[in-house]
Image (cartoon, helix red, strand yellow):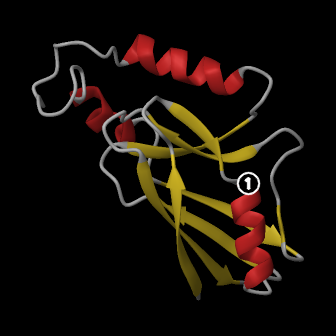
């Protein structure tokens, strides 16, 4: 298995960060052929998603998260900025892992699909992400 950790700067606002190019670079660097790309975010307040970006779906996802998990004082987890407890609930809805099939060194994503980091934690502007390639 080939594995590598990268750093993603998400800043101080909720973001959907497209990881597709970083994943392609990783696969090229390990001479991937057929197998599985696994992505893992070792954080308690971030998740991964496969979705369309750039046409509004990424903003729609953040709006849906705000609707489902409002940033207010209802959360028992109380450290950090107001409403930060919801960030700790996020990975139950968007898990911190994703696996994508790879054929001939290319991720088998659909036409409009991208692999994305979803980070709503405004208190942590830097994230780590681990890509692993398992040869099949």
Q: In this view, does 55 lie to the left or right of 6?
A: right
As helix, strand or loop, the secondary structure at mark 1 comes to helix
Point 76% across, 58% down: residue:
21
Q: Could you tell me which residue is drawn at 16 percent across and 13 percent down?
A: 73
Q: Quadrant of residue 32?
A: bottom right
The x, y position of residue 87, in whole percent, is: 31, 33
Q: Mark 1 points at which residue?
A: 20
Q: Is residue 99 left or right of residue 22?
A: left
Viewer-nearest residue: 127 or 87: 127
Q: Position of residue 110 (x, y in %)?
A: 84, 46
Left or right: where does residue 45 sit relative to residue 82?
A: right
Q: Is 92 or 25 nearer to us in this picture? A: 25
Q: Which residue is drawn at 50% across and 43% down?
A: 10
Residue 59 coordinates in the image, percent (x, y): 63, 21
Pointer 1: residues within 10 angstroms few (<14), some, or many (20+)?
some
Quadrant for the C terminus in the image: bottom right
**On screen, residue 116 above or below 133:** above
């Amino acid at each position: 298995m080939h594995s590598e950790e990268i750093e993603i700067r998400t800043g101080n606002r909720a973001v959907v960060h497209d990881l597709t190019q970083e994943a392609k670079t990783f696969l090229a660097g390990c001479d991937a052929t057929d197998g599985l790309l696994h992505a893992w975010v070792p954080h308690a307040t971030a998740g991964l998603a496969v979705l369309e970006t750039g046409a509004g779906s990424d903003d729609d996802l953040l709006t849906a998260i705000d609707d489902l998990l409002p940033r207010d004082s209802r959360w028992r987890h109380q450290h950090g900025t107001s409403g930060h407890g919801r960030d700790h609930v996020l990975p139950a809805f968007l898990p911190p892992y994703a696996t994508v099939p790879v054929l001939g060194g290319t991720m088998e994503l659909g036409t409009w699909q991208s692999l994305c980091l979803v980070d709503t934690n405004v208190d942590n502007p830097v994230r780590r992400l681990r890509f692993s390639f398992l040869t099949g």
